[in-house]
Image (cartoon, rainbow, N blue to C red):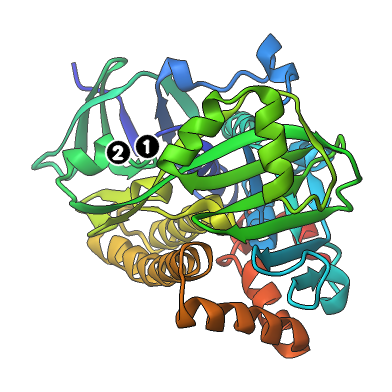
Amino acid sequence: MSAPRLDVLVVGGGPVGACVASLLARAGHHGPALTVGLLQSAAAMPDSAAPAATEPDARVLAISRASERILQAAGAWTALQPQAWAYERMRIWHAGVAATGEAVLQFDAAEVGERNLGYIIENRRVTAALMDSFSAAGGQVISGELQEANLGEDGLVHIRSSAGELATTLIVGADGARSAVRTAFRIPARTTRYEQTAIVARLIPQRPHQNTAWQRFLAGGTLALLPLADGSVCIVWSLGESDARVLLEAATGDFEARLLTDSDAVLGALTLVGPRLAFPLHRLTAERYTAPHCALVGDAAHVVHPLAGQGVNLGFMDAAALAQLCVQARTCGEALGAQRTLRAYERWRKGENQLMEFAIDAFNRVLAQGVGPLSAFARRALVMTNRSALLKRFFIGHALGQPPDLTAWESDRAWQRR
């Protein structure tokens, strides 16, 4: 008996995997239907109805304008919008200057005629909304883990998983930095340790967060305070590994006292309201994004430092670009795993992602960890940027992003209205 056959199998049901799966499943609404499966381990399945989902979640995503439009096209934004908290301003400064001085780099949506600069949303809610959209579009969620994947002489990828055997025209690796798909297709990846750990936690500030995302470059790391709908903030605090271990084990009062100092008291005292989570930081770059009948997206292809909050946005752009090219190939009668389609995807996304990886890495090394003349110049550059409306508009526009062509997924083009 032959294994069930799919057009596309996405491995990994995090936000990026659920996004590309939903986009491809919904593409059938505008042409020949695609059979799309999503393979995800049972332990990682989101369950928005679970009791734990009512508790505050410290893991949040900063969603750009481009990602907002991609989520709209994926059918998830309507469910997410009531839970998304818009931030209107950003304040970025170095530990060597006062938080209220002219050396603070300030971005304001009103300065460029935008309604906001983006949204902060809990990670689990984004994943759950995308999984719901995928299922509603006719996608098949498969609970299991990838064990083996091989390209057969018949041009199909034959898959053995804990859920059984499958065959697919295209396999998409969205299974994170330790991607089993990347390993199965022998795609090398370069990994560089930052020798930093990110502490993530949720806190109640003494003063209102002012719908502002705050980021301070510290000696050895960065601290971001991200505003949430209930008035709380989520911190993403990257520190040297030994310093992070001390803070993770510190008494709550000691942790809060250090945080007050490192935040320059911009929001007053910060009261911890949940667990402290820790994530070791590293940079990862896959040597290739594709192999025959295989494509990598998100963290399976690239992992960046969290200081700019761009990791998931880069992944959503991967998802949208791959979906667009697959739909174009399908329209032209080409196989989804055709080499021309996959090469086009790799050329498109690899260059853009590597440029962002380099920029983020430079910010971390020069502003957060740098010393000497180069670091001093970078701090002066923040001041010069703050004084230039043209530069500020350029950076805001780049941060908002421009998604791939999503008109094939639109029915009312509501996402295009500003």
Image quadrant where residue 252 sits:
top right
- In front: 288, or 384? 384
Image quadrant where residue 404 sits:
bottom right
**Residue extending farthest top:** 51
Which mark is drawn over residue 175? 1
Amino acid type, residue under disc 1 in the picture: Asp
Within 10 Å of the Cα at label 1, are there few (<14), some (14-19), or many (20+) other Cα atoms? many
On the image, the x and y values in percent for residue 4 come to 30, 24
Q: Say what secondary structure mark 1 lies in.
A: loop
Q: Which residue is mark 2?
A: 179
Q: Is residue 398 above or below residue 389?
A: above
Image quadrant where residue 112 sits:
bottom right
Is residue 76 visible in this depiction of the protein? Answer: no
Within 10 Å of the Cα at label 2, are there few (<14), some (14-19), or many (20+) other Cα atoms? some
Q: Quadrant of the C terminus?
A: bottom right
Amino acid type, residue under disc 2 in the picture: Ser
Q: Tell me which residue sits at (42%, 38%) in the image.
A: 242
Q: Are marks 1 and 2 in contact (CB under 8 Å)?
A: yes
Q: Say what secondary structure mark 2 lies in.
A: loop
Q: Tell me which residue sits at (78%, 64%) in the image.
A: 99
On the image, the x and y values in percent for residue 289 come to 29, 57
Is 86 on the left-hand or right-hand side of 124?
A: right
Q: Tell me which residue sits at (52%, 54%) in the image.
A: 221
On the image, the x and y values in percent for residue 40 come to 41, 25
